[in-house]
Amino acid sequence: MPASSLPVQVLLGLYLGLLTGIVPALVAWGLGFVFKYFTGVSIPGFGVVVLALAIAGVNGGLLALNDAAIRDAANGTALLIAIIVVLMISLYAHAKGDAMGSSLPKRITLKSLTERTLSTDVIDLANGRGKVHVTVAGDVADIEGYPALPQDLRASIRGFAEDVDADRPLAELEVLVADHLRAEFDLSEAVVRLDERGQATVAAAPPIAGVSKRVPDGTRAVSVPALLPTGLARGDEVTVVTEANGTFEGSVVAAKSDGAKAETAAAPAETGTDGQSPAPTPAPSSPTTTGGDGRLTVAVDRAAARTLLGATVRRVIVRSRGTRREFELLALLRRAGKRFRRLGVRAGGALDGRSLREAAVRDEYGVAVLAVRDGGRWQLAPHGDVTPTAGADLIVVGTRDDLDRFGREVSS
């Protein structure tokens, strides 16, 4: 065959490279994927080059046996280009197989394949992270065995809306939304069912108790008119100074500024833990006061309760509670991307009947178990020999993804 021009040589080289590079590319992709997925090790690029050249040599030899023109010395340029094309295709295929092996989940279970997920049409990617706007659809149902919801509370729940992360299965989002409903409306129970478009069907139970459940044992809640500071909230420690009856120390159970649109809680004149007088059910409330004249409900010991009821309050002093180291710790962990979660051990799960050391919780799941509650007793900083049983509670810390994966394997 006479010598061909350079363009013809280039085209011939591209043709031969694509024709003989298919099999080396498939082999390179397969080896890259298998090694990365099962061992976490990437094959060096030199090894890919040697393997691709060997396989391409076999393919090229077969082609040369069938076509004498390929063996012509004048086609040296075409053969060089063909070799370059084969190597480029093989290295690219190996890189793709390696990337797929590192990104594919190591455990694919039937549960993960059958999990319901949100429709991509309702996920908002405007902020760089997928969000879905969850709203309540239809009427809010009552839960059997609980009192019926008051109409104002039912209407407030119907108006609930929140943006939540969309990178979770619907089952986890349902639990998350139910927790938010219980926290925001102080519900005794909430059951949420989400559809693929983020519409929530809700059944809820009203609060069973109001002020009484926030009054410590051995104390009584007393309501008095007073000049309240701005920002007073439940749980604050205060000193109530009266004109003629001395001072009284206690913790804030509820507070309301006159003219405020919402209150932290509704309170009776006096409520005891012995069930002497019932406490009304509070409506959804604001967490702090707006300042000015108002009404304060404070928990004091029983001996001081009647005295404080008949006293005239001069001022309310809020006492410092000092630095809360536990909250500082939580803030540090959150800034590091860590989260806390309480999980229950399900029967037949990864931890049922296995010790923490046997399950290799830290190495396998990347989480740390801070406490275990089994048989009614909490054990802090459990050692590796602790063996939780079905029904035990765990306090776990880790990243959100690690906690989700650990929860799917362990929790009910």
Image: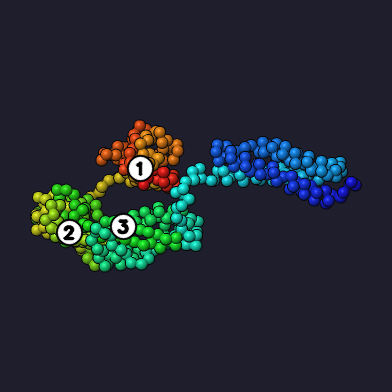
Distance in Å between CA atoms under marks 1 and 3: 24 Å
- Mark closest to the chain's N terminus, 3 or 2: 3
Nearer the camera: disc 2 or disc 1: 1
Query: In the rendered image, is residue 397 in sight?
Result: no
Q: Are marks 3 and 2 in contact (CB under 8 Å)?
A: no
Q: Position of residue 374 (x, y in %)?
A: 29, 39
What residue is pinned by disc 1? 347
Q: Amino acid at mark 3?
A: Ala
Q: Amino acid at mark 2?
A: Ala
Which mark, residue 279? 2
Distance in Å between CA atoms under marks 2 and 1: 40 Å
The local secondary structure at tag 3 comes to strand
Q: Residue at x 85, y 43 (%)?
A: 68
Q: Which of the 4 quarters of the picture holds residue 296? A: bottom left
Q: Along the horizontal axis of the image, is 275 left or right of 399?
A: left
Q: Which of the 4 quarters of the picture holds residue 262? A: bottom left
* Callout 3 crowding tier (Cα within 10 Å): few <14, some 14–19, many ≥20: many
Outermost residue on the right side: it is: 2
Q: Along the horizontal axis of the image, is 328 left or right of 61?
A: left
Which mark, residue 69? none
* Callout 1 crowding tier (Cα within 10 Å): few <14, some 14–19, many ≥20: some
- Mark closest to the chain's N terminus, 2 or 1: 2
What residue is pinned by disc 3? 190
Nearer the camera: disc 3 or disc 2: 3
- Mark closest to the chain's N terminus, 1 or 3: 3
Q: Along the horizontal axis of the image, is 277 left or right of 354?
A: left
Q: Which of the 4 quarters of the picture holds residue 136? A: bottom left
Q: Position of residue 411 (x, y in %)?
A: 37, 45
